[in-house]
Amino acid sequence: MLPLGDPELETQIAGELEEIERRLVAAARTADALVSAPANHLLAAGGKRLRPVLVLLTSQFGSGVDDAVRQAAVATELTHLATLYHDDVMDSAPLRRGAPSAHEVWGNSVAILTGDLLFARASQLVSELGPVAVRIQADAFERLVLGQLHETLGPAPDEDPVAHYIGVLGDKTGSLIAAAAHYGTLFAGAGDDVRAATVAYAEKVGVAFQLADDVIDLASDAETTGKAPGTDLREGVPTMPVLLLRARAAAGTLDPEGTRLLADLDGDLGSDDVLADVLARLRAHDVVTEARALARTWSADAVAELDPLPESTARSALQAFAGLLVDRLS
C-alpha cells in the first residue's frame, strides 16, 4: 500500500482495495471460457491501482467510501485496463506488467475486442451510478480516444511538439485520473470548490506520472517496469527525453552526442544490440535530467491546485500521493 502519512487512512484504503480487487475480478469474469483468459490477462498481472486509490482518497473530502464510490473505483480501473489492451496493440509492446502482452498471446484482433469488452463492462457499472457519472465517463472516454489520435497523427506543422505531447498526456492519462477524482468527490458529496481543486490536481498528477514513466522506462529494466525497455523508441512512439533532444536540435543548441543520438534514433533500431546501445547513451544524456525535472514541476503544480482547500488528512494524503508518483525517479 502507498504510504499516505496517516496509518489509519492507509489501513482503511488497503482494506477497500481488497474489496475493489474482488469486484474487478467479478466484473472481468465471463461464462465463455474462450473469452475468460484474455479478459483476465492484465488483471491477473496486477498493477498499481492508482485510479481506484484516487477515487477512495478524494471521497475523504466528503462522507467517505460507500458502495457508489467503490463501484466508480472499479469502473475507472476497468476503463484503464481496457486502454492498455489497445495501447499495446498500437505500440507493438511485447510486455505489459512483466507478462506477454495480450496481442502477443492471442493476436491483435482478440486484444482489441477484449479491450472493447472491458470498456463495455465499465460502462455498465457507470450506467448504474446515474447520468452525471455517465457523462464523466463519456467525457473521459472521448479524451482518451482524442489523445490516442493526436499521438498517432502527431503535431501540426506549426505546433510545438513538446506542448503537443503534454496535451496528449493530459488526454491519454490525465483525463481518467481526473475522472477518478471527480467520482470520489461527487459520490461523497464534497462541495463544488473541493471537486474543482481535486480534479485540477488529478489532471496534473496524471501528466506528472506519465512524464516520470518516460524516464523510468529508459532508466530501468523489464523486471522493474514490467515492460520491455526501448519499445517506444523502436516503434517511434514519442517520449519526453527524445522530444527534448529534437527541441534542442530545432533551436540549434544540441550537443554532438545528442546529434548522433538523434541520427541513430531515426535509423534502424531493429537490432537488439543497436537498441541497447542507443538506450544506454540516451540514459546518460542530460535531456533525461531535464525530463525528470519537468515531471517534478508538474507534480508540484498539481499539489498547488490543493492550496484553496483547508488542511486535512485527505489533503495531506493527496500531497503524499503526488510526491510518491515522482519519487520513483530517485
Image (tube, helix red, strand yellow):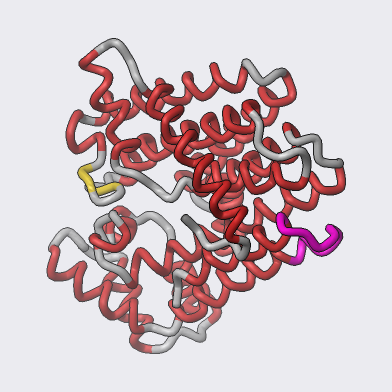
Looking at the picture, how far across and down is residue 193, in whole percent?
86, 47
Magenta stretch, main secondary structure, is loop
In this view, the residue farthest toward the top is 31
Q: As displayed, is residue 144 above or below residue 297?
A: above
Magenta stretch containing residue 132, yes or no?
no
Q: How many marks?
A: 0
Which residue is found at the position 68% from the left and 31% from the top? 136
Looking at the picture, how far across and down is residue 194, in whole percent?
82, 48
Q: Camera-side residue: 108 or 43? A: 43
- Magenta-colored span: 304-314
Quadrant of the image occupied by residue 273: bottom left
In this view, the residue farthest toward the front is 8
Q: Is residue 153 left or right of residue 271?
A: right
Q: Is residue 325 left or right of residue 67?
A: left
Which residue is found at the position 52% from the left and 73% from the top? 247
Looking at the picture, how far across and down is residue 88, in whole percent?
33, 42
Q: Camera-side residue: 17 or 325? A: 17
Q: As displayed, is residue 273 above or below residue 115?
A: below
Q: Is residue 303 left or right of residue 262?
A: right
Which residue is found at the position 51% from the left and 79% from the top? 290
Q: As displayed, is residue 19 above or below residue 227?
A: above
Q: As displayed, is residue 62 above or below residue 3?
A: above
Magenta stretch containing residue 310, yes or no?
yes
Quadrant of the image occupied by residue 215: bottom left
Q: Camera-side residue: 275 or 70? A: 70
Which residue is found at the position 43% from the left and 58% from the top? 238
The quadrant in which the C terminus is found is: bottom left
